[in-house]
Structures are given as structure tokens and as C-alpha cells.
Image: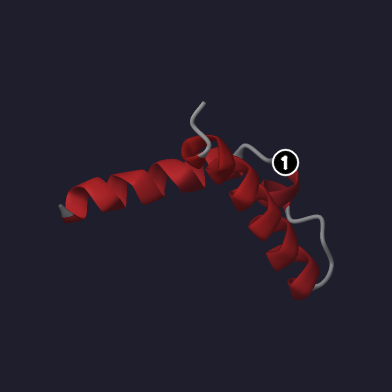
């Protein structure tokens, strides 16, 4: 069970690294950076929960 969650988290961070802004950290302030990570995470998570 732990391996499954670890694998999902690792895949999530690999997908998050594809976002150039997150990978290169263009944002100057910590709040701005965390905000963009939150936005990118929500956009990656949304297709998983919204099943049509």
C-alpha cells in the first residue's frame, strides 16, 4: 500500500516538473511560487476527479 502511494506522488511531481515555470522557479517571492504550485496542482488533479 505504501509503495502505491509513493509511486503516485512521484508521478505527480514528475508531471509538475513539466511546467516550465515551476521547474525553473521564475517567481521571486515564496508566496507567488507556492500559489503557482497550487494552481498547477489543481489543474493536474481536476481531470482525475471530473469523470464524464
Kindly state the secondary structure of the residue where label 1 is placed: helix
Residue 20 at x, y percent in the picture: 72, 41
Residue 23 position (above or below residue 35): above
Residue 38 at x, y percent in the picture: 65, 59
Q: Is residue 32 left or right of residue 7?
A: right
34 or 45: nearer the viewer: 45
Question: What is the residue that sits farthest to the left in this orientation?
Answer: 1
Question: What is the residue that sits farthest to the right in this orientation?
Answer: 28
Residue under the image location 82 percent in, 61 percent down:
27
Residue 18 at x, y percent in the picture: 62, 37
Residue under the image location 39 percent in, 47 percent down:
10
Q: Is residue 28 left or right of residue 30?
A: right
Residue at the disc numbered 1: 20
1 or 52: nearer the viewer: 52
Residue 35 at x, y percent in the picture: 73, 64
Q: Is residue 14 left or right of residue 21?
A: left
Residue 48 position (above or below residue 29): above
Residue 28 position (above or below residue 48): below
19 or 38: nearer the viewer: 38
Residue under the image location 53 percent in, 37 percent down:
50
Amino acid at each position: 500500500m505504501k509503495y502505491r502511494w509513493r509511486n503516485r506522488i512521484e508521478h505527480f511531481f514528475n508531471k509538475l516538473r513539466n511546467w516550465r515555470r515551476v521547474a525553473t522557479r521564475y517567481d521571486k517571492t515564496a508566496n507567488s511560487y507556492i500559489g503557482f504550485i497550487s494552481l498547477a496542482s489543481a489543474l493536474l488533479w481536476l481531470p482525475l476527479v471530473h469523470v464524464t
